[in-house]
Image (cartoon, rainbow, N blue to C red):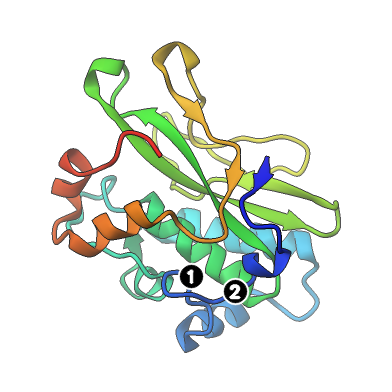
């Protein structure tokens, strides 16, 4: 994996979409994490919260569009782009560097269905002195993402024969193209079918 920013501090910043200084984000981070939680427990708790308690818009057929982490937390729904903003925000609120990663996936099971850009997270584990990737998209039939320290179990397995791509960059902020689409959209379900970019 390759850091897009050379400064680890950039993976701790509060910003427009990863707005961890928002009082609601800070409150949730403090609610989820007890004072005696170690780093690994903290990351696992926040990962499972976003994966399991924040619903993926498509899975529940919810038209609401969210982008900023604080809005995702408030509405309890979002597509992967939005959910990754929330997980990064919660982690940064506790001083844990977190970034955004991307994959190019088929929309369906074959290339003729088209492609989309999927977002997930990378988190720097100081305990292990390494970055690990975690995917809080949300599990359902056929998707079983989990957080492990010694291996990846992401939501999707890349199929190179379908021209799917596992991008290796770790971004400090979500790529602008994804956030612009969220900002312009009023229906998450329509957006999911008609407005997702096919490559970075």
* Label 1 residue SS: loop
State if disc 1 and disc 2 touch (CB < 8 Å).
yes
* Label 2 residue SS: loop
Numbered circles on residues, count: 2
Q: Is residue 37 visible?
A: yes
Percent position of residue 150, x then y? 78, 38
Q: Quadrant of the N terminus?
A: top right
Q: Is residue 78 visible?
A: no
Percent position of residue 83, x then y? 43, 58
In the displayed structure, does residue 150 sit left or right of residue 27? right
Q: Quadrant of residue 161?
A: top left
Q: Residues within 10 Å of mark 1 (few under 14, many from 20)?
A: many
The residue at the far top in this view is 161
Closest to the observer: 111 or 78?
111
- Residue at position x 51%, y 25% in the image: 157
In the displayed structure, does residue 35 sit left or right of residue 156? right
- Distance between mark 2 and mark 1 Cα atoms: 8 Å
Name the residue carrying label 1. Answer: 18
- Residue at position x 29%, y 65% in the image: 66
Q: Quadrant of residue 194?
A: top left
Q: Earlier in the sequence, mark 2 or mark 1?
A: 2
Percent position of residue 175, x then y? 43, 54
The residue at the far front in this view is 6
- Residue at position x 44%, y 23% in the image: 164
Asked if residue 122 is positioned above or below residue 22 in the image, the reply reads above
Q: Quadrant of the C terminus?
A: top left
In the displayed structure, does residue 138 sit left or right of residue 4? left
Name the residue carrying label 2. Answer: 13
Percent position of residue 103, x then y? 47, 36
Closest to the observer: 41 or 169?
169
Asked if residue 70 is positioned above or below residue 134 in the image, the reply reads below
């Amino acid at each position: 994996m390759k850091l897009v920013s050379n400064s680890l501090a950039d993976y701790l910043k509060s910003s427009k979409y990863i707005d961890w200084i928002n009082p609601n984000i800070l409150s949730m981070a403090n609610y989820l994490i007890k004072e005696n939680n170690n780093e690994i427990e903290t990351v696992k708790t926040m990962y499972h919260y976003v994966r399991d308690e924040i619903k993926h818009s498509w899975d529940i057929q919810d038209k609401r569009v969210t982008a900023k982490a604080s809005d995702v937390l408030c509405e309890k729904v979002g597509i992967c782009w939005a959910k990754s903003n929330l997980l990064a925000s919660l982690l940064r609120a506790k001083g844990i560097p977190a970034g955004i990663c991307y994959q190019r996936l088929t929309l369906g099971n074959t290339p003729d269905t088209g492609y989309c850009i999927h977002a997930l997270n990378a988190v720097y584990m100081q305990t292990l002195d390494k970055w690990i990737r975690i995917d809080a998209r949300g599990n359902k039939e056929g998707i079983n993402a989990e957080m492990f320290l010694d291996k990846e179990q992401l939501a999707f397995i890349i199929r190179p024969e379908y021209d799917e791509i596992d991008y290796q960059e770790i971004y400090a902020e979500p790529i602008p193209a994804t956030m612009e689409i969220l900002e312009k959209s009023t229906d998450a379900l329509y957006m999911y079918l008609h407005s997702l970019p096919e490559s970075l």
